[in-house]
Amino acid sequence: MLTAVRLGAYVGVLGVVFGAAWGAGSLARPSVAPATPAAVTAEGPASAHTGMDMSPGTTEARAGTDGLAATAGGYTLVPATTALAAERSSDLTFAVAGPDGRPVTAFAPRADGSTLRLLVVRRDGAGLQVAHPEMAADGTWRAPLRLPTAGTWRILAEFTPEGGTPTVLGTDVFAPGDFTPLEFPVARAAQVAGYQVRIDGDLRAGAESAVFATVSLDGRAVTDLEPERGTFGDLVALRAGDLAYTPVTAQTRAEPGDRSGPGIAFTTTVPTEGIYRLFLRFRHAGEIHTVDFTVPTTGAATTTTGGAR
């Protein structure tokens, strides 16, 4: 608990320093609201990972950890259906096939206490949803989803086969209908349900980067952020354009009953120069909130992008 409080206070000071830049970083832009997942409490490790490890200094993620392919390392993400109706609750059913072509049923637990984490995001980089589905005895996974719009949606599954290595596989599912892809201006500030959130820190390609989120509510610092799966915040980083997954590590462990804030510290190593979509999920007053940012690497051109179509 002491570690959480001290780190929260330290990042809180950073939040005050960076707060003067809030207006410059806050840009009005359309958004697609994600569905709020069911709350699950689990403890994490001393330094809780919200993704896979990637050693500082590497310029590309290890094969099979960026989610750009449906098959990697002998494992394949196999959705039972490839089309879902927009604005309607439905189940995404899928399996992970092993080298023998059969569904894998033995997985190592992830650091956040789950066995598999599922990320769902529209191909233009909008509307991230996060789910931790349960597996049936036959290796079938079922995740309840409600896609808010039509379009092409990217599915990313993070898991570690028992005795294997951390793996991220990706594939597309479709929601028939018309939609307009969004473009996202560079933005380090966002608002949701009265909360103001700012992201600070430089992203440097191929080098470990420190990233800090600062959370306020109605202009006042939030100092009682609640644990969610072993951390005070979950940051998802996806490269704009191809939605390549980039690992992020939360720097504070959160035990049940701990509180912290207003700052949340992370580290990440983005593999290439460019623009990244960052999604922060945090829990406060019993509710999970999601905000998104668009951040370029240091020195990268700050053009907007709507992602792959």
Image (cartoon, rainbow, N blue to C red):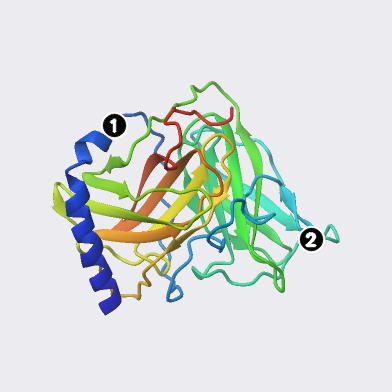
> Residue 260, how many percent across, how many down?
25, 67
* Of the pair 36 and 294, the residue shown nearer to us: 294
Q: CA distance from mark 1 to mark 2?
A: 45 Å
User: Foreground mark, 1 or 2?
Assistant: 1
Residue drawn at x 71%, y 70% as measured from the top left:
106
Residue drawn at x 47%, y 41% as measured from the top left:
276
* Of the pair 92 and 104, the residue shown nearer to us: 104
Looking at the picture, does residue 181 appear above or below residue 122? Answer: above
> Residue 13, how many percent across, how many down?
19, 59
Q: Secondary structure at mark 1?
A: loop
Looking at the picture, does residue 62 appear above or below residue 29? Answer: below
* Of the pair 25 and 227, the residue shown nearer to us: 25
Instruction: Tell me the tag on residue 98.
Output: 2
Looking at the picture, does residue 240 appear above or below residue 93? Answer: above
Looking at the picture, does residue 71 appear above or below residue 116? Answer: above
Residue type for callout 2:
Gly
Q: Is residue 1 visible?
A: no
In this rendering, position of residue 240 left or right of residue 102: left
In this rendering, position of residue 231 left or right of residue 93: left
In this rendering, position of residue 13 left or right of residue 124: left
Quarter of the picture containing the N terminus is: bottom left
Give the labeled residue for mark 1: 27
Residue type for callout 1:
Leu
Residue drawn at x 27%, y 47% as measured from the top left:
197
**Nearer-N-terminus badge (1/2):** 1
> Residue 83, how many percent across, how many down?
65, 35
Q: Is residue 131 visible?
A: yes
Q: Secondary structure at mark 2?
A: loop
